[in-house]
Image: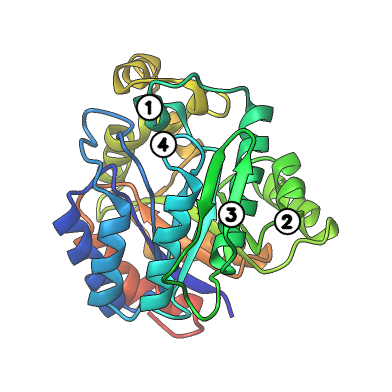
Amino acid sequence: MTLYGFHASHEQIDPGGLLAAAIRAERAGFDAAMCSDHFSPWSERQGESGFAWSWLGAALQATRLPFGVVTAPGQRYHPAIIAQAIGTLAAMYPGRFWAALGTGEYSNEHITGEAWPRKEVRNARLRECVDVIRALLAGAEVTHDGLVTVDRARLWSRPAEPPALVGAAVSVETARWCAEWADGLITVGAPHEHLRRMVDAYREAGGRGRLRLQVHVSYAADEDEALRIAHDQWRTNVFAPPVCWDLELVEHFEEAAKHVPPEAMHDVVRISADPARHAEWLQEYADLGFDEIMVHHVGQSQDEFLDVFGAKVLPRLRGGVA
């Protein structure tokens, strides 16, 4: 059975409010949760960027939900520090934590002052980081000289069972590459044929583990309001790679999105005032083979979305009547 989770967006909601939303999501009946890991939001209107790793400790303690995070070791984070963060959370909350590893976006990584590498270099750097993190979680002392440098690192506090290290991908090629090293795959909403090809590429290349999908939705009781929310909060997120990877500052995203019309939001966000329509969309994604679907309401106010989806969307997906 497909699990339906709540995506907690640190770019949009202050940490205390986001924790309250995660608690409310569990009470509404969501099965799981995950969060982003940003240093910068995508727009001034979003306006937040809480530190995911300290927040995750609070969220895991405040709920009984399994949690994941999408993070990017290699530039903003040294892989040994990410291994320590993963190991600590997995030791404290056995079986409830996973981490998805990706190559990141320049808007978050430029803060180190280092050059932003080409995509193929970022992939190679991530692959080195994965090996370092796995070795540390397994208890090895690690020294490594490459695109990242590690000197005699060892994790002294580790979980009994290392958690899943999931590959984050948005292209068929990256999904196939993730199959070499990942314990699962996570991607974002896209046309069904593209998602089907990603799933097939990952599985045919020997990819193991669970398939997860993050879906952006906008719900309000009024259709026009649902569209207004999507356009206000998510119009800076309509750009496909490499634009979304390579822009540097909030101001750059704002300028790029200056002429994005409201109707363009339907290409990246599922927008409707009808809970039944949202249930249909989510079921279509489940039918593609995803084991977990993480639902992200792109508005900053989460309460109405959580309550309505808990009462009217999740029961439909589970075969009940709502």
* Closer to the camera in the image, 270 or 18: 18
Query: Pointer 3: what residue?
Result: 142
Q: Are marks 1 and 4 in contact (CB under 8 Å)?
A: yes
* Residue 66, percent from left and from top: 42, 74
Q: Amino acid at mark 3?
A: Val
Mark closer to the chain start, 1 or 3? 1
Q: Residue furthest bottom?
A: 320
Is 153 on the left-hand or right-hand side of 256? Answer: right
Q: Residues within 10 Å of mark 3 (few under 14, many from 20)?
A: some
- Is residue 186 visible from the viewing direction of this image? no
Which callout, 1 or 4, points at the residue further toward the start of the chain?
4
Q: Which residue is mark 4?
A: 76
Give the mark nearer the N terminus: 3 vs 2.
Answer: 3
- Is residue 255 positioned above or below 65 on the image? above
Q: Considering only order in the chain, which callout, 2 or 1, is on the residue closer to the N terminus?
A: 1
Q: CA distance from mark 1 to mark 2?
A: 34 Å
Q: Amino acid at mark 4?
A: Arg
Q: Is residue 309 visible?
A: yes
Tell me the residue that label 1 is attached to. 112
Q: Where does residue 170 sit, x and y in percent of width and height?
A: 62, 42
SS at mark 1? Answer: helix
Nearer the observer, disc 1 or disc 3? 3
